[in-house]
Amino acid sequence: MQRMIILLVFVYAGCVQAQVKSQLFVDSEPYEYYTFQDSLALSAHIRSLQIKWLNDGYYFTGRDSITTTLDTINIYLHKGDKLDVQIDGLSGKRVISKLSKALSEYVNNGYPFASMKIDSVRVNHKTLTGKLVIQPGPEVTYDSAQFLSPVKTNHKYVYQLLDIVPDDEFSEKGYKKINEKIKRSSFLELQNPTDLSFKNKKAKIFLDIKEQASNTFQGVVGLQQVPSGETSVVGNIDLDIQNLFRSGKQFQFAWERFSEQSQQLNIFYKHPFLFDSKISPTFYFDLLKQDTTFITRNTGLGIQAYLSPKIGISLVYERAVGTLLSTDIENVSRSGLADFNRTLYKVELFEGNKSYFRNYASSIAWNISISGGRKTIDRNLSLPDTYYDSIQLSTDYFRMEVGLDYQLLVLKRQSFFHSLSAGSLINEELLRNELFRIGGLNSLRGFNEKSIFAQSYMLSRAEFRSYFENESYAYLFYDQLIFAANEKKDAPFGIGLGFALATSSGQFSFALAVGDSETQPISFSAMKAHFGYISKF
């Protein structure tokens, strides 16, 4: 019995060029006419077509011949008779499943022109028996990419970001996911679909990439009332460099003054693809000073990698130290404060890029993190020993946080933006200087910055935006918080309006907000005004 070809993947070398026009004939009859982006797309289409026939029981499907007419490739296929099948001890769709799985292993690991056939074929009473034989074809690796527009970002970083590193084995699945992988970056954007060509066992990718200004410098100024009834100026400075030295390195510096004697400092650094690996080390340092009461320092070392084109994972070792600045026993006892050391191990999954939410576009981003470790309360020699008699000095500590941001386009130039976040701390000796801090422009608008202490919380921030340019819009917002801290529970909310205006070098923002809670009823005399400017470079 002659060898029967089950699946066509290889298309001869003359057709490996962009924009492949093809005419398919089945059993000598015209079947369909298509123009494909490249030969790989043509091969994939024929493969999917024949797998469909195989699923329907036409196990004699194969290729008869290939001819060319001017700029068109004519491919002649046949379906054959419908039969039952017994191949390598498998029958029916189990054969197709094995075939598809085996072929995928080849085309995604350096053999895009792999093909299969049935050897030792026998037909007996409409039952086909035989043995699957794989013909891998030539091994193909990535060549350097062809950039259709000038790209100043280090090309090595682009290759690693898109998983198209020169001399690595070609992957059809990886190539098809380039459009998704580039969204990992906030400063690179595909202008047109990617293209592909094969030559001398090398795959060359054609990329039309546009670099965007993504580095930002942000300044925000706010007005809030202090307990004395006077008005205090608060604000922050936020520097976010997404493409340091045009190498994909990320550096963030943020300083915030959220009350008269309180401030916070945050530093973050990410080094992409260490030693040409898929792993990106991270480092962060946070310092929080609460007036003259306490100071907390938090240091983290971690690594990031991608589990799929969109979903990343982060593993972090975190060390926190809390120190009392005031040892007034009455204040310390009433507030539930103490010196502490805490070691945590964190796992985080994430997807999406929040920088897209300033644009008129549908976007989504989410993250979920779980941390666990051990906390030790340190004795302060300035406090009496009796203060620690009822305190467990060493306890287990757990922290969980989730977040979801999305924007939906609902009308011609209007959108609905919604940000959901939640967190919970689990510890038998939870201290006030460990709690979540909520309030202000970036969390619950209408309230003083970081004025709410919470052990567990859920925060919803909803905005209805009306765009008049891509990054310019007016909006109405409603923020709702539900939180608990020790025995206290409350559900404060904030409402207001604002606008964001794009300029030649950045974005100016303004918001008016008023809040309501058990301790702060709505009062327009307590309205919060927030001014901000984001400079992009």
Image: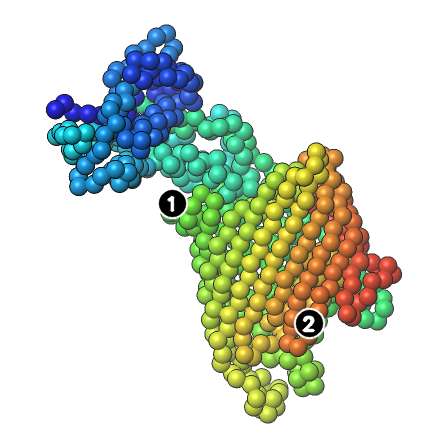
Tell me what residue is drawn at x 63 percent, y 50 percent.
239
Q: Residues within 10 Å of mark 1 (few under 14, many from 20)?
A: few
Q: Is residue 423 above or below residue 463?
A: below
The amino acid type, in three-letter code, at marker 2 is Lys
Determine the residue located farthest toward the top in the rendered image: 70
User: Front-most of 157 and 392?
Assistant: 392
Mark 2 = which residue? Answer: 489
**Residue 388, located in which quarter of the rendered image?**
bottom right
Tell whether 353 sits left or right of 257: left
The residue lying at 85 percent from left, 66 percent from top is 230
Crowding around mark 2 (Cα neighbors within 10 Å: few <14, some 14 to 19, many 20+) is some
Q: Residue 91: in sight, yes or no?
A: yes
x and y, in percent, of residue 174 in the image: 39, 37
Report the amino acid beneath label 1: Asp
Which residue occupies 54% across, 46% down? 352
Q: CA distance from mark 1 to mark 2?
A: 50 Å
Task: Identify the image quadrant of the N terminus.
Answer: top left
Percent x, y of residue 531: 77, 50
Mark 1 sits on what residue?
276
Residue contact between numbered discs 1 and 2, judged by CB atoms under 8 Å: no
SS class, disc 2: strand
Q: Where's the C terminus, which quadrant?
A: top right
The picture places residue 316, in percent across and down from the top left corner, at: 46, 61
